Image: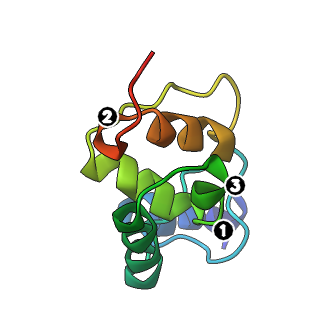
Amino acid sequence: MHNIFLNLVKYHIETVLGIRQVGKPEKGAEFPPATPEEMAQARKVMEKGVKKKSQLKKIKIPGLLALCEENDIRLPRPQEGRIKRATIVDALFVSPSHGVEEY
């Protein structure tokens, strides 16, 4: 019983077994992977051609991150916490795979 109060059980469940609590992610935690539906929506937007940043802002962040990974786009590390949607959109918008030249 004393181990429960020392967080040993929590450590074992989360670290050793790899089971995490479902719900609100911890501050600075990674985003969950994109679902197949999010990826389908993201690819559909990309196939139509991106002419405005607002088109990319409609895609959820996990989908945007997956698009960056598919297109080998490197993102800067955030100074604090999570990466911002605007940073990801900017990186995707100026990538050469979308017909917009880098500067």
Percent x, y of residue 59 = 58, 65
Residue 96, numbered label: 2
Which-is-in-front pick, marks 2 and 1?
2
Q: Earlier in the sequence, mark 3 or mark 1?
A: 1
Distance Cα–Cα, label 2 vs label 3? 34 Å
Q: Earlier in the sequence, mark 2 or mark 1?
A: 1
Crowd class of label 3 (few under 14; some 14 to 19; many from 20; radius 10 Å): few
Q: Which residue is at 46% across, 32% downward?
A: 94
Residue 15 visible here: yes
Q: Which residue is at 50% across, 61% downward?
A: 62
User: Mark 2 near mark 1, Cβ–Cβ under 8 Å?
Assistant: no
Label 1 sits on a secondary structure element that is helix
Percent x, y of residue 5 = 72, 63
Percent x, y of residue 57 = 65, 57
User: Mark 2 near mark 3, Cβ–Cβ under 8 Å?
Assistant: no
Q: Is residue 55 left or right of residue 13?
A: right
Distance Cα–Cα, label 3 vs label 1? 21 Å
Q: Quadrant of the C terminus?
A: top left
- Amino acid on which disc 1 is placed: Ile
Q: Which residue is at 38% across, 35% downward?
A: 95
- Amino acid on which disc 3 is placed: Glu
Residue 26, numbered label: 3
